[in-house]
Each structure stands twice: as structure tokens, then as C-alpha cells.
Image (cartoon, rainbow, N blue to C red):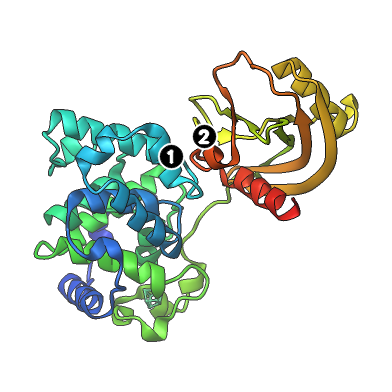
């Protein structure tokens, strides 16, 4: 394909109005009943769009409902303690989304009197609000014809318009944005964008698009040529990195548990976890390494019990393989402000990454 293909060439002889009508009418009739579609409150649209990044709709629904119950508006989220927000996000992953959302909401609270901005310039300057979220909030909450391009939308349009550009490249996203600026319904940009997203989610799916049920089939060039499964073109990501960890669930004589807070920057920042470290094969068995880690790191003589389980957690770029052990320590003050010793009841108030929640579940089952 010509490298410098433009949106004008792509839309030549394309029935823009017919496509928009078919898409929007289908969306009106077939859209799923989702909690964030009950009203157009920009705050709720914003929360839902952030939660839906990298996460399936079914997973998001209960999180969204409980998050909105706890933080029903800008003010309540702006004033909330970060630990409570992370707790509400616990298990949803990509925790920087929650931290960025809260700091952006605080900015809206302080700078814009609690009203989510309704223009590209202001809204896209908020933390964690990229071009996709900008377009989604502006079109859904305010009816502004702004593109909202994510992987789903690129898949659908690459098929409809037979676009063979590599969707992993940033400049391809720009091309899709330009196409949508010409294509988007100026009467109903909200349903146009939501219709594209919905079509990608339930009809034009990655491996087995349901073309026979598709409302825009007559407009779809990939379908006409029988190449829908070859699109979109996407170069493969780099191999994921594998990390071997050893972790310990340690309790004292009063059945209190030792947990620590992760650093405030980087992966899973500010979440809580059981003590753990990267295993070094040459330094002995995992059990021995854990014992000396607790001594050097926290000054604790621990009594090791049994091996508990292995936990594997797969991130988008990284895999953790964790050997988990249980042990005891003698209660004493630990001079570190990233460590607390808490009862089982108190432990429930802290937000843990999924891998550590799974360790805990396994531990409770075996207890
Ligand atoms: S006809 Fe098939 S490939 Fe084309 S948009 Fe519809 S589901 Fe996707």
C-alpha cells in the first residue's frame, strides 16, 4: 500500500452517510445495557473509559458500580485517601490508571470548579487522559465530534476501509483519527463512536468476525474481498521478560502479618505486598534465601514453615513466577516506614496486586 495514503483516498467512493446511519441505527437497537450508559455524566464516562482500557467489559462492571458508589462525583474522588482508591481498584490491574485518574480529578476539582472540561485543549492536558479518552469523553458526554481511536476501532475500520497499515505504529493511529474526522456523524458523534466500539466488541471481533450479522457489511471492503481475517496488520510485540521471585507470608505470635508497601514509582506503585525478592539460583534454596533476606532486609530471625505454592502472574510485558513460603517471626518493632504488621482484619483494608491476593487465598485455604 502507498505509504502516504490519505483519508481522502480511503474515503473515495465510500458511502459515508449510509455507513453512519447503519452503524448508529444498529447501536440504538443492539447496544448492551451497561451501567455507564445510564446517563452522560462526564465523570462517570471518564471513570468507565479509564477502567475499560486493557480490561474486559464483564470485569469492569462490578468495579465500576462499586467505585461510583464509593466515589459518586469529582469531589468525593478528589478528597479520597489514595489507599482507599487503590483498594477500590484492587484486582483491576494497571494501577497507574487509578492514581492518574485521581490526580486529574483533583485538578478538575481545583482548577475547573469540579466541571470536566468540554474542549480538547483542557481535557487532554489532564494526567492519564490521552487522545482516545479525550475523544470518548468529549463525544459521549458533550456531543463533540472528536475521534476516539483504540485497538477495537482500528480493527473495525481497517477492515471496513481495507487499511493495511501497521496499527502498532503511532502514525497509523493518526491516519485513523484523520479518517474518523471525515467520517464521524456530526449529528450524533456519541453514538457513532460508541457504535464503532460496540461493533468491535461484539461483532467485528479479532479472530472470528460475525460478518453475516454485521450491520455495516454492505460497506465493508475486507468482507467484499474475503480478507477480513487478515486485518488489521499488526507487528508482534517483543517477547515478555520472565522474573523468578520468592515471597513469604510471615506471622508473629499474635497472628499479625508483615506486609510492605511497594515504591511510589514504577510497576504496581504504592500497592501492598508480602515480602519478596528476585531469586538467585547460586545463593541456595528459595527457603534459605528467604530466611537470609528477612534477616538482612528487616533484621528478623524467621522460622520457616512449609512451602505454600507457586504463583504465576502474567503482565503485558513481564511474567512473575513466585515460590511462596510461610514462616513465623517474633514480634518486634521494625524500623521502616514502608512496613506494617497488621491483623487479618486490618489486612483486608490494604490494596494488594492480584498475585499477592492469590497467595493469600491459597494460604487461607491451606490454613
Ligand atoms: S463485515 Fe465483517 S469484517 Fe466487515 S465490519 Fe462487519 S464484521 Fe467486521
Direction from residue 7 to residue 113 in the image, left or right: left
**Residue located beneath label 1 in the image:** 86
State the residue in front, 317 or 312: 312
Rendering coords of residue 225 (x, y %): 43, 78
Task: Tell me which residue sits at (40%, 55%) in the image.
Answer: 63
Label 2, label 1: how far apart the Cα atoms are: 7 Å
Rendered view: 109 above or below 227: above
Instruction: Find ligand 1 in the image and state its quadrant.
Output: bottom left
Q: Furthest-front residue in view?
A: 254
**Crowd class of label 1 (few under 14; some 14 to 19; many from 20; radius 10 Å):** many
Rendering coords of residue 90 (x, y %): 48, 46
Task: Tell me which residue sits at (83%, 43%) in the image.
Answer: 307
- Which label was assigned to residue 265? none
Rendered view: 334 above or below 93: above
| Residue 127 seen in the figure | no
Rendered view: 110 above or below 212: above
Cβ–Cβ under 8 Å for marks 2 and 1 = yes
- Sequence-wise first label, 2 or 1: 1
State the residue in front, 286 or 27: 286
Rendering coords of residue 311 (x, y %): 71, 48
**Crowd class of label 2 (few under 14; some 14 to 19; many from 20; radius 10 Å):** many
Direction from residue 147 to residue 305 in the image, left or right: right
Give the SS element for disc 1.
helix
Give the SS element for disc 2.
loop
**Residue located beneath label 2 in the image:** 271
Question: In which quarter of the view is residue 221 placed?
Answer: bottom left
Amino acid at each position: 500500500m502507498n505509504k502516504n495514503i490519505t483519508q481522502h483516498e480511503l474515503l473515495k467512493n465510500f458511502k459515508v452517510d449510509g455507513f453512519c446511519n447503519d452503524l448508529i441505527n444498529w447501536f440504538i437497537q443492539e447496544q448492551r445495557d451497561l451501567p455507564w450508559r445510564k446517563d452522560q455524566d462526564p465523570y462517570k464516562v471518564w471513570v468507565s473509559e479509564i477502567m475499560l482500557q486493557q480490561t474486559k467489559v464483564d470485569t469492569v462492571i462490578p468495579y465500576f458500580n462499586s467505585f461510583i458508589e464509593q466515589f459518586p462525583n469529582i469531589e468525593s474522588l478528589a478528597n479520597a485517601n489514595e489507599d482507599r482508591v487503590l483498594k477500590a481498584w484492587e484486582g483491576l490491574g494497571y494501577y497507574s490508571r487509578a492514581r492518574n485518574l485521581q490526580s486529574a480529578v483533583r485538578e478538575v476539582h481545583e482548577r475547573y470548579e469540579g466541571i470536566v472540561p468540554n474542549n480538547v485543549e483542557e481535557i487532554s492536558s489532564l494526567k492519564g487522559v490521552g487522545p482516545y479518552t479525550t475523544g470518548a469523553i468529549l463525544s459521549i458526554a458533550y456531543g463533540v465530534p472528536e475521534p476516539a481511536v483504540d485497538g477495537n476501532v482500528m480493527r473495525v475500520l481497517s477492515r471496513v476501509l481495507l487499511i493495511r497499515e501497521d496499527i502498532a505504529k503511532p502514525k497509523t493511529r493518526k491516519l485513523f483519527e484523520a479518517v474518523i474526522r471525515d467520517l464521524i456523524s456530526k449529528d450524533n458523534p456519541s453514538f457513532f463512536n460508541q457504535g464503532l466500539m460496540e461493533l468491535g466488541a461484539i461483532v467485528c471481533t479479532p479472530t472470528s468476525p460475525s460478518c453475516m450479522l454485521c450491520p455495516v457489511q454492505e460497506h465493508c471492503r475486507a468482507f467484499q474481498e474475503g480478507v477480513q481475517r487478515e486485518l488489521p496488520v499488526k507487528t508482534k510485540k517483543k517477547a515478555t521478560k520472565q522474573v523468578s521471585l520468592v515471597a513469604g507470608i510471615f506471622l508473629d505470635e499474635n497472628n499479625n502479618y508483615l506486609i510492605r508497601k511497594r515504591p511510589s514509582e514504577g510497576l504496581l506503585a504504592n500497592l501492598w505486598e508480602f515480602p519478596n525478592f528476585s531469586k538467585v539460583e547460586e545463593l541456595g534454596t528459595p527457603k534459605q534465601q528467604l530466611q537470609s533476606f528477612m534477616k538482612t532486609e528487616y533484621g528478623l530471625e524467621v522460622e520457616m514453615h512449609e512451602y505454600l505454592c507457586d504463583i504465576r502472574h502474567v503482565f503485558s510485558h513481564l511474567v512473575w513466577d513466585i515460590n511462596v513460603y510461610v514462616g513465623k517471626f517474633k514480634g518486634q518493632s521494625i524500623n521502616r516506614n514502608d512496613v506494617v504488621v497488621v491483623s487479618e482484619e486490618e489486612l483486608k483494608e490494604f490494596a494488594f496486586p492480584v498475585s499477592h491476593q492469590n497467595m493469600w487465598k491459597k494460604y487461607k485455604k491451606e490454613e
